[in-house]
Image (tube, rainbow, N blue to C red):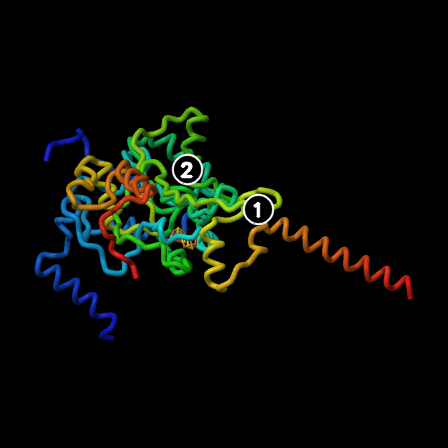
Amino acid sequence: MPGSLAPRLTAYREAAEGRATIRQYPYQPLPPPPRLRGVIQIDPEKCIGCGACATACPAKTLVFDRERARLVYSVTRCIFCLLCVETCPKGAITSLREYEILVEKTPTQVVKHEPARCIKCGRVYASKKLLEEVEKRVKRKLPHLKTCPLCKLEQAAMITAMRVLRARQAYRKR
Amino acid sequence: MKPKRMKSVWLYHLNTGGCNACDIEVLAALSPRYDPERFGMKLVESPRHADVIIFTGPVTYQALPRAIEVFRVARPIGVLAVGACACGGGIWHDSAAVLGGLDPLLELLKKMGVKVPEKIVKLPGCPPRPHAILYAAAVLAGVIEPRSAASGQSRYSSPSQIAERLAHRETGEAQEPSQQHR
Ligand code: SF4
Ligand code: SF4
């Protein structure tokens, strides 16, 4: 089985050449392997604050705070899976190829966004950049984007109730 | 190299319910390829002999009494939390069956009146590389200084520097070009 023999042969050769121990390592930094996954970095310019990365994050260490329209990333709980990198629709997240990550506290990165307020209740429900992006993608103005999901729900409930009432009245008249 | 301490640093490996990936990496870091015995580090069987505890796992309630006992007996000078679980609970942080890593455990120990170590270093990753574990152990033992970003050797180095860099990024100022993963 040449496949299973090859790494062992490499190890023997390295031992014979006196390279079995990484002698220089903690004193000198070693270059990281090409596909190493490391700390993520969010580009505040590119990020639109959609929160897709926060939904994808299995450790929930990347959190999107909807009430304050900000994205918070803390390093210690991150498992460097890069699901956030794959999920981000704008390619705003990149990973640094770095493995000597030694921390005492919990370093965090906060990406603040301009909050969009609901025109009915005044609650913050998204970032302005996200609404702009949505309108840009569908290529027209969407007035119903200006209300928050809760108000929309209320509105929908009202419309349904009115319909039911009208149908009932029509039934009674018959 | 100046002698930093009187005695070699002996390590005790404590798994508090992790998935064993970090433990395998720790054992790999203790292998002859990385050779921490040149710094006088070795794995000991009893917590009574230990100076530094290598701590892995999210502290499940099954493992909690043993973990407390180990800390009470060992009275270590330092703790090295290896892996995302040990650092902050990892993907189990909101589970009902775990305490959530090293910080809550140390708080609990303080409340119980157990002496907690001064030197606490966390190494996130799932799992971290053996290189990183060797580096962290060497920093904890005082063999090497944490690499400084100023010297251009390493971007993330000392705990304060990673915080500084991340704080720096928040303002969106110009940074050095990063190497991209994809
Ligand atoms: S790399 Fe994984 S764990 Fe870390 S923030 Fe991204 S999705 Fe979350
Ligand atoms: S997925 Fe990308 S654009 Fe959306 S909040 Fe996360 S970083 Fe920003």
Residue B67 numbered tag? 2
Which quadrant does the N terminus of chain A fall into? bottom left
- Residue B15 at least partly seen: no
**Which residue in the structure is indicated by mark 1?**
A118
**What x and y, as percent, mark residue A136?**
46, 60
As drawn, A7 above or below B37: below
Q: Is residue B73 left or right of residue B3?
A: right
Rendered image quadrant of residue B45: top left
Mark 2 chain? B
Task: Report the amino acid beneath label 1.
Answer: Cys
Pick the front one: B31 or A41: A41
**What x and y, as percent, mark residue B124?**
34, 46
Pick the front one: A55 or A122: A122
Question: Going 12% across and 59% down the picture, which residue do you hit?
Answer: A15
Mark 1 chain? A
Cα distance in 3D space between marks 1 and 2: 50 Å
Task: Give neighbour class at mark 2: few <14, some 14-19, many 20+ (Cα, 10 Å).
Answer: many
**What x and y, as percent, mark residue B55?**
35, 41
Pick the front one: A54 or A143: A143
**What x and y, as percent, mark residue A10?**
16, 65
Task: Report the amino acid beneath label 2.
Answer: Ala
Task: Tell me if label 1 and label 2 are in contact, CB under 8 Å.
Answer: no
Q: Is residue B137 left or right of residue A53?
A: left
Outermost residue to the front: A141
- Residue A41 at least partly seen: yes
Asked whether mark 2 lies closer than 8 Å to ligand 1, one says no
Question: Going 24% across and 49% down the picture, which residue do you hit?
Answer: B29
